[in-house]
Image (spheres, grey):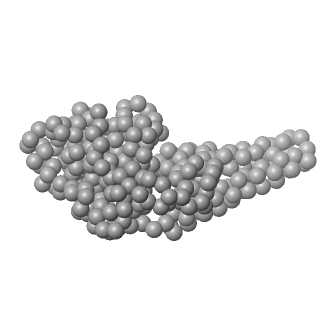
Amino acid sequence: MIGHIIAIGVLIAIGIIGVVLSVRECKRHDEPIKTLARTLCESVVIFSFGTSLGVALTVMYSKVFWVLMAASATMGYLILMVSTLSVLRKLKGREKATVTKLSAPPAMLIENPSDAIVLLQALHRYARVPVMVITREPYAEWVKRTGVTPEEYVWLTRVPHERGVDPANLHVLLERAARFLRENPGGVVYLEGVEYLLLYNDFKGLMKFLIAVKDMAVLHGGHVIVGVTPGALKKEELSLLRREFERADVDLILKETLGSALFEVVSSGVVKKDAGAEGSEGGSGAGKKTTEKARPLRREETA
C-alpha cells in the first residue's frame, strides 16, 4: 500500500513539474516550438494524472482499472510522438530554405521609417533572412501595415501579453534578442520605438542595451537595425547613436544582397513566384506558378 502511495506521489510530482516547465517554454518560444511545448503539457497531464488515477482506483477498488493506466500512458506517448515528428518536419523545411547572407554592416541606423519597411519587405520576400521585430505596435497591426511576418515579434507594452515585454525591462529584451541571434545565424533584429523606450529608461541605459545587442549580432554573424523617427532624439543623443550604428543605404544593401539582376526585377515590380507560398494555410493554389506584379520597392510616406 505504501509503495502505491509513493508511486502516485511521484507521478503527480512529475506531472506538476512537467506542466510548469512546458508552460514556461511555451511562453518563451514562437512557432513551431510553442506548439511542441503546448503538446508536451497536454501529454504530461494525460500520462501523469491519468496513470496516477488508474493506480489509485486499482488499489482501492479493482484491478480492472489497470486499463486506465495503460490507456493514459499510451495516449500521452502517442500525442507527444506525433507532435514531435510534426515539428521536426517543419524545422527540417526551414533548414532547407535558402537564406541569403545580408550584405550590410552588423549595426545600422535608419532615420526614415519607410526605408526600414522597404528593407524588411525585401528581406522577407526575396532574401529569406530571419527577422526579429521589436516595436511599440501590436503584432496584427504591424503585419497588416508592412506585409512582413517576422520569425519573432516583441511588442513593447506594459500590458501583460504573450508577445509583450515591459519597456523598462531592457534585460529581458536583450535576452530575447541574444537567443534569436544564436538560433538564427545571419538574422536581423529590427528595433523601432526608441522614443517609447526612453520614457522608461535613461539614454545611457538604452545605449548600453543597444551596444550589447550590436555585440551579439557581431558575435553570431547577424545584424541589428535601429529605426529612429525624425525628431525623436536630441542632437547629442542622435550623434552618439550614429557613432555606434552606421547610417544605412537601403538601395545599396539590397543591390549587394539580392544581386543587380534581382534588384532590378524587384524594383520594376514584376516577379514570378509560387502562389502557394504566399497563400493561406489551407494551401489553395499551392504549386501553381503564376506571374504577378509585386509592389515595387519604393518609399511610401506614412501618416
Quarter residue 214 falls in: bottom left
On the image, the x and y values in percent for residue 230 come to: 18, 39
| Residue 106 visible, this angle | no
Q: Which of the pair 196/290 is nearer the observer? A: 290
Position of the C terminus by quadrant: top left
Residue located at (42% from left, 46% from top): 147
On the image, the x and y values in percent for residue 68 come to: 83, 47
On the image, the x and y values in percent for residue 221 come to: 31, 66
Quarter residue 143 falls in: top left
Residue at the limit of the structure toward the left, as seen here: 236
Count all numbered tags in the image, as a single digit: 0
Q: Which of the pair 120/300 is nearer the observer? A: 300
In this rendering, would 64 be left or right of 131? right
In this rendering, would 48 be left or right of 220? right
| Residue 251 visible, this angle | yes
On the image, the x and y values in percent for residue 293 come to: 44, 53
Residue located at (21% from left, 56% from top): 248
Q: Which of the pair 259/70 is nearer the observer? A: 259
Residue located at (27% from left, 39% from top): 301
Q: Is residue 249 above or below residue 137?
A: below
Q: Is residue 160 above or below residue 280?
A: above
Q: Is residue 180 above or below residue 219?
A: above
Q: Is residue 138 above or below residue 103?
A: above
Residue at the limit of the structure toward the top, as seen here: 159
Q: Which of the pair 207/277 is nearer the observer? A: 277
Residue located at (59% from left, 53% from top): 36
